[in-house]
């Protein structure tokens, strides 16, 4: 029987020293550890007009042509990638996937990197877990407003986070046919 009562006794032990600082920019071998479920979002969107090759159409001023699409529903999910091999083995890098109409490259680049030719977005959570690829990681800076606990004043802090610039196939005929984590060459 599982004891979740407030009377259960616990033994103190040091927690893991999790490091959430960004890893250096570069190419890393990574495995898809988890993909969160899709979440729907509906909003009015100015969709970039594209030609038959997917290239954005421009007006005479060189600005992208856009068309308002009211109540457009698109889906987002988060991919948790685990670095395998090398000095950053086990570290996590996150990447958002989206069916947003202005991001037509997002899901295809992810599928290309992990070596899947074609699947529906609804199959991504089921069919991509455990697959490996190389990821091109960069560090992005953003500002976050936090409240100083001592003064109660809001302060702006610079934060840094890793993002995936691109997914790259592992140079092999079928890198995900038999996934091995040893001797990755890193």
Image (cartoon, rainbow, N blue to C red):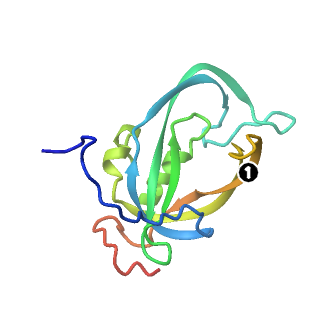
* 68 in relation to 119, above or below: above
- Seen from the viewer's position, the closer of residues 63 and 144 is 144
Please tell me which residue lies in front, 7 or 103: 7
Of residue 122 and residue 147, the one placed in the foreground of this image is: 147
Task: Give percent across and percent down for residue 19.
Answer: 52, 65
Quadrant in which residue 32 is drawn: bottom left
Residue drawn at x 40%, y 65% is 14
Tell me if residue 145 can be seen: no
Place of residue 33 in the rendered image (x, y in percent of width and height, measured from the top left): 38, 56
- The residue identified by callout 1 is 157
Task: Evaluate whether residue 18 shows in this view.
Answer: yes
| In the image: residue 100, left or right of residue 84 | right
Q: Residue shown at 43%/36% (left/top)?
A: 38
Determine the residue located farthest toward the right in the rendered image.
61
Check the image and name the residue furthest to the left.
1
Left or right placement of residue 38 versus residue 27 in this view: left
Q: Is residue 14 left or right of residue 51?
A: left
> SS at mark 1?
strand
Q: Where residue 81 appears, x then y in whole percent?
A: 45, 58
Q: What x and y, as percent, mark residue 97? A: 50, 44
Task: Count neighbours of disc 1 (C-alpha within 10 A) and say few if under 14, some if 14 to 19, many if 20 or more.
Answer: few
Q: Residue at x 41, y 39 (%)?
A: 121
């Amino acid at each position: 029987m599982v004891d979740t009562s407030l009377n259960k006794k616990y033994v103190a032990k040091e927690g893991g020293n999790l490091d959430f600082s960004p890893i250096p920019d570069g190419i890393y071998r990574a495995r898809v550890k988890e993909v969160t479920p899709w979440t729907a979002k509906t909003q009015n969107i100015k969709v970039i007009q594209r030609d038959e090759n997917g290239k954005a159409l421009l007006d005479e001023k060189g600005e992208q042509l856009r068309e308002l699409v009211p109540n457009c529903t698109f889906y987002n999910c988060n991919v948790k990638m685990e670095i395998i091999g090398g000095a950053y083995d086990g570290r996590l890098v996150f990447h958002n996937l989206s069916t947003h109409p202005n991001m037509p490259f997002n899901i295809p680049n992810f599928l290309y990197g992990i070596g899947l030719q074609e699947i529906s977005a609804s199959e991504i959570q089921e069919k991509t877990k455990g697959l490996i690829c190389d990821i091109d990681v960069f560090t992005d800076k953003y500002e976050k407003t936090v409240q100083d606990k001592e003064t109660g004043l809001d302060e702006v802090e610079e934060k840094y986070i890793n993002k995936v610039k691109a997914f790259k196939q592992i140079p092999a005929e079928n890198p995900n046919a038999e996934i091995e984590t040893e001797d990755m060459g890193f």
